[in-house]
Amino acid sequence: MNEIEYKLYIDDVIRRVETARLKVSEHHIVKIVAVSKYSTADEIQRLYRIGQRAFGENKVQDLKAKAKELEDLPIEWHFIGNLQKNKINNLLDINPSLFQALDSLELAHELQKRLLAKEMTLDCLLQINSAKETSKHGVMPEDAVTIYTQIINECPNINLKGVMSIGAHSEDKAVVRKSFETTHEIFTQLPNTSICSMGMSGDFELAIECGSNMVRLGSIMFNK
Ligand SMILES: *Cc1c(COP(=O)(O)O)cnc(C)c1O
């Protein structure tokens, strides 16, 4: 695809997001985070030139390398992957715009310690394992509100902005919908939240219909 074809292709993806959000409400704004984990710095730049500004990575070392390579561009970096404790300081050195995968109270406490030591704060989302899949990270739906409140009370350097979830791994659309509804229901019960991050390349329209206001699109944004 040349530059013009790629722009038309992206316009079409944006139109799909637009159609889905208008089904919810004219006032329902959805942000696209382009997940660049399978893409090179050149490919990120190409999408940046079309107008995309928020990009997400799921490995700290990849985020570090790409953020460094593209440091001249005002990119908003999101970290969307599982964070191991021994990588916390590396992540904080990059100072991402949003850490979307805070998945336990234990990790929150560890993160709080490091943030305090560095005199920093970090915007985060609590990851919810809405379909209770053993393959996925995140807090159980029934514990989410309690843990969210505990993090607010015990971790003053963590700014919780809302929730993140990956849709159920299923061919059955009703099962995927149920998992998004579970996350959105939790989102509505939390204090001062603004972000409900759910929906990927294969299920973003359904996620938006269920109330998502941030979609994380990888393969579809980079045409892979
Ligand atoms: C890879 C990834 C995505 C994007 O997946 P696609 O199916 O390529 O859109 C979104 N969220 C998370 C947490 C991911 O790891």
Image: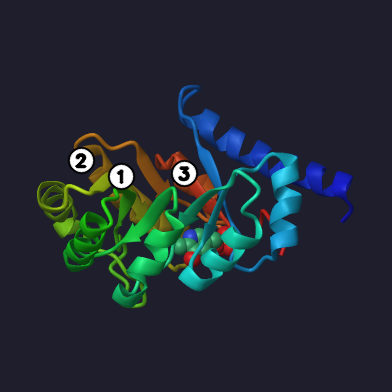
Density class for disc 2 (Cα within 10 Å; few <14, some 14-19, many ≥20) is some
Asked if residue 9 lies left or right of residue 80, the reply is right
Residue at 75% across / 60% down in the picture? 42
- Cβ–Cβ under 8 Å for marks 1 and 2: yes
Which of the labelled discs sits on residue 214, or is there none? 3
Asked if residue 124 lies left or right of residue 200, the reply is left
The picture quadrant where one finds residue 35 is: bottom right
Asked if residue 193 lies left or right of residue 135, the reply is left
Residue under pointer 2: 190
Which of the labelled discs sits on residue 162, or is there none? 1
Q: Looking at the picture, which amino acid does disc 1 mark?
A: Gly
Say if disc 3 is inside 8 Å of ligand 1: no
Whether residue 166 is visible, yes or no, is: no
Upstream in sequence: badge 1 or badge 2: 1
Density class for disc 1 (Cα within 10 Å; few <14, some 14-19, many ≥20) is many
Q: Residue furthest front?
A: 118
C-alpha distance separating marks 1 and 2: 8 Å
Q: Looking at the picture, which amino acid does disc 3 mark?
A: Met
Q: Looking at the picture, which amino acid does disc 2 mark?
A: Leu
Residue at 59% across / 39% down in the picture? 17
Mark 3: which secondary structure? Answer: strand
Which of the labelled discs sits on residue 125, or is there none? none
Q: Position of residue 6 (x, y in %)?
A: 81, 49
C-alpha distance separating marks 1 and 3: 11 Å
